[in-house]
Image (spheres, helix red, strand yellow):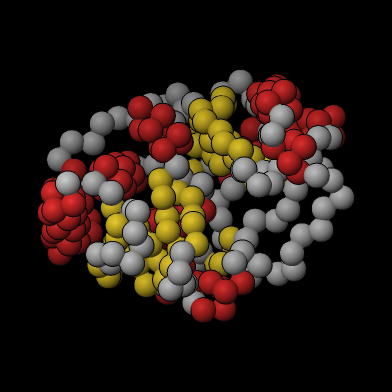
Amino acid sequence: MAKRRMTHDPHQFVNAADDRRRLQLAVQLALPTNAHVLARNFARSSASSYWLLMLDQPDSQVPDFLTLRIADHKLWLSNHEQLTITWEAGNFEAVAQTLHRQLTPTTLKQYSYHLNALDLVTLRLILHLEQHQLIWLVQLAPTIAKAYKNQRLDLHADFSQAKLLLGNMNNSSLQLVPVTQSAFQTRIGQYFGRNLLFSQFTSHQLLRLLPTNQWIRPLLRVCPPTPNMEQQLAANYGTDFVRIYVEAIRQQAQLQSMSS
């Protein structure tokens, strides 16, 4: 995948608070009445922005959600679950027109996703692990890792075959625990493709997957509670899966007590 060529300076947009407000207004004015912006974040090094939209569902306790990406270049992920709008950074008139054309009830329904009880408890586990300085990582194929976003990562074919690891959030070479659980790994790939997780490259061909807290926390607040987290996780992912992360939390606590 070739590196993008830009005819504008994305930093001129990224660093301008007024431009971000104008873009947010364009998004809000284009939304149908049953949708609103629950969270959004802006990339630091490009003119990309990500928007978590909540779609009210009158007959359901849990709303539907949609990830909207507005960017000046293609996403390096394949089989992601995002509605992507391409724009030339700073051209607010053009992007507003595109948003009005694209953000129709039919399109929102096509790209939206529903989170069931297992999704909610899995997201709560991800936050729970982060509180203990633990995150999920995948070991990429060498060609993808070396290309650093210039070769596409297929979230179905490549991600599902990658080695899944549970490790220390601050030191990716410390306490790496392999975890083999295909159903869980599939969900991690989905959350990554929805921007509920974001990535950081490390050495040893590892991709760190960190929770997008400014999205997950407000999302969980508008969804029903999920009691008995460990029992639900054991029932769906197996007791070995629970044992692995409980032991990792215990070891992490030991490391922290030794260093304090």
Q: Nearer the viewer, residue 260 or 139?
A: 260
Q: Indicate the position of residue 142 as horizontal and vertical percent values.
A: 51, 79
Work out whether residue 141 can be spotted. yes
Q: Indicate the position of residue 94 as horizontal and vertical percent values.
A: 84, 35
Horizontal relation, residue 152 to residue 131: left or right: right
Q: Does residue 255 lie above or below 31 as drawn?
A: below
Q: In the figure, residue 96 lies in which quadrant?
A: top right
Horizontal relation, residue 10 to residue 57: left or right: right
Q: Indicate the position of residue 40 as horizontal and vertical percent values.
A: 56, 33
Tell me what residue is drawn at x 77 percent, y 60 percent.
4
Which residue sits furthest bottom?
142
Q: Does residue 15 lie above or below 81 as drawn?
A: above
Q: Quadrant of the N terminus?
A: bottom right
Horizontal relation, residue 78 to residue 117: left or right: right
Q: Nearer the viewer, residue 169 or 235?
A: 169
Q: Total number of numbered labels? A: 0
Work out whether residue 101 can be spotted. no
Horizontal relation, residue 79 to residue 47: left or right: left
Tell me what residue is drawn at x 42 percent, y 59 percent.
208
Tell me what residue is drawn at x 61 percent, y 64 percent.
149
Tell me what residue is drawn at x 49 percent, y 77 percent.
141
Which residue sits furthest front?
260
Q: Indicate the position of residue 195 as horizontal and vertical percent values.
A: 51, 47
